[in-house]
Amino acid sequence: MSVAGDILGLLKGEAQADRVVPRSGQAARLTLAVSGAMAFLAVFALALSLAAGRLADRWAGALAQSSTIRLSAPEAEMEAQTWAVLTVLEQTPGVESARALSDDEQRALLEPWFGPDLPVADLPVPRLIEIVETPAGYDAEGLRARLAAEAPGAVLDDHTRWRRPLVEAADRLRLLGWLSLALILGSTAAMITLAAQAALASNEQVLRVLRLVGARDAYIARAFVRRFTRRALTGAAVGAGLGTLAIALLPRAAAEGAFLTGLGFAGAGWLWPLAIPPLAAVTAFWATRIAAFRTLRGLR
């Protein structure tokens, strides 16, 4: 029997052939439980990896169009060099805007480490100048050369060393999501294969009788494939539904818990769990089909 015939039989169903497969027992419970548990885990694996990938993308995107200049100079020359740097930035193609942070803003940046009473005005704290780039960006090396000539104490940080690891982390987290899904599907296939083999072995005498009365291996295998595929689809649908509900009920992080903001799915990402039951069904289809024909060949 061809694969197309098995799929057609799966959709139509045959009441007489379905009697070959036991309706209850360890194999049935194992298939439903494994499919449901693996689908539940698959939902969480996808949710966590996609959320982490979005977070890394958000960080990388925020840093991609922003830069900072750190200006160190004697107090008497600080204002003059600050204006010199701002003038250079105004004349630099690719710089959308630039401004020097005030003492209050710099104090707010340092407050988490040094407390709220830090005397910024009395300390040799470098002046920070924030740069917002255009989408096209600017020539960082050219800007560094001009700054070295106009304001020797200015150091440009274009966030490249921060952005690159975040982009790499996002790519790896996406890959981790697919790898986790592949491992879950592989484990599901292994467990369903064992369940199908157990069901076939427990009905060995019935299978031999069916052969004596003219039943072909394809007819017998199709019955097992249909039953186990439907069980896997049912279990995975329940597991994916529970997993999605659990993700939806997770508490949303407050502003102080920004690292956890967006944990779960977002937008069209909520459609991802819908793909898990069909994937589990396809996995069960092939696992049971291979196990059934292999076992039936061994009975000859």
Image (cartoon, rainbow, N blue to C red):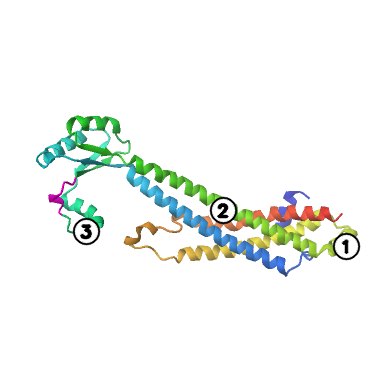
Crowd tier of the residue under label 2, counting other residues whose Cα lies within 10 Å: few below 14, some 14–19, many 20 or above: many
| Residue under pointer 1 | 209
Image-based side of 294 in relation to 53, left or right: right
Image-based side of 175 in relation to 13, left or right: left
Using the numbered discs, state the Cα–Cα distance from disc 1 to disc 2 in whole angstroms. Answer: 41 Å
Circle nearer the N terminus (1, 3): 3
- Dividing the picture into quadrants, the one containing residue 156 is top left
SS for dot 1: helix
Q: Residue 181 carries which label?
A: 2
| Residue under pointer 3 | 115
Q: Give the range drawn in magenta.
A: 119-125
Q: Position of residue 62 (x, y in %)?
A: 33, 47
Residue at 19 percent of width and 53 percent of height:
107
Q: Where is residue 240 in the image (x, y as percent from the top left)?
A: 56, 62
Residue at 63 percent of width and 63 percent of height:
34
- Dividing the picture into quadrants, the one containing residue 79 is top left
